[in-house]
């Protein structure tokens, strides 16, 4: 039980860190894409494209999701937890 609690604390901190990194890398573009309704966060910890006619939004989402997947995997491996657990924790933070 202690290991799980410790892992969850690490996941929370890592999720915040990930949010900051992702937001800094794409702050204006991601913010604009969300504001315009082209993309949205999902409960899976990844973005989806709402308006696929917006090719820039499609490219943006693909790039950010690849970076998120890599980061989630790193965090999961470091904490010996399933990637899905990291994705869920990140989704909770990102959807606030």
Image (spheres, rainbow, N blue to C red):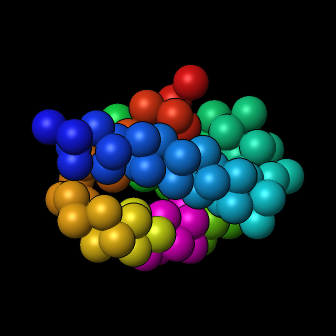
Residue 38 position in % (x across, y down): 61, 43
Q: Residue at x 52, y 53 (%)?
A: 14
Q: Which residue lies furthest to the left in this view?
A: 1
Return the residue nearer the eye: 15 or 94: 15
Q: Is any atom of residue 41 visible in this view?
A: no
Is 67 included in the stretch rendered in magenta? yes
Q: Is any atom of residue 16 visible in this view?
A: yes
Residue 19 position in % (x across, y down): 62, 49
Q: Residue furthest front?
A: 2
Q: In the figure, residue 79 lies in which quadrant?
A: bottom left
Q: Residue at x 76, y 43 (%)?
A: 31
Q: Which residue is drawn at 62% across and 65% down?
A: 60
> From the viewer's perspective, is 16 left or right of 20?
left
Residue 59 position in % (x across, y down): 59, 71
Q: In the figure, residue 24 lies in which quadrant?
A: bottom right
User: Most prominent secondary structure in the magenta stretch?
Assistant: helix
Q: Which residue lies furthest to the right in this view?
A: 28
The stretch in magenta equals: 61-70
Q: How many marks?
A: 0
Could you tell me which quadrant the N terminus lies in? top left
Q: In the figure, residue 74 lies in which quadrant?
A: bottom left
Return the residue nearer the eye: 37 or 89: 89
> From the viewer's perspective, is 59 left or right of 30?
left
> From the viewer's perspective, is 15 left or right of 91?
right
Could you tell me which quadrant the C terminus lies in? top right
Return the residue nearer the eye: 80 or 86: 80
Residue 50 position in % (x across, y down): 49, 43
Is 13 included in the stretch rendered in magenta? no
């Amino acid at each position: 039980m202690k290991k799980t609690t410790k892992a969850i604390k690490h996941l929370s901190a890592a999720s915040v860190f990930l949010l900051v990194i992702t937001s800094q890398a794409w702050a204006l573009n991601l913010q604009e894409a969300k504001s315009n309704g082209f993309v949205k966060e999902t409960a899976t910890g990844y973005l989806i494209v709402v308006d696929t006619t917006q090719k820039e939004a499609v490219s943006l989402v693909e790039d950010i999701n690849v970076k998120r997947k890599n980061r989630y995997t790193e965090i999961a491996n470091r904490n010996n937890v399933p990637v899905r657990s990291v994705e869920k924790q990140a989704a909770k933070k990102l959807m606030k």
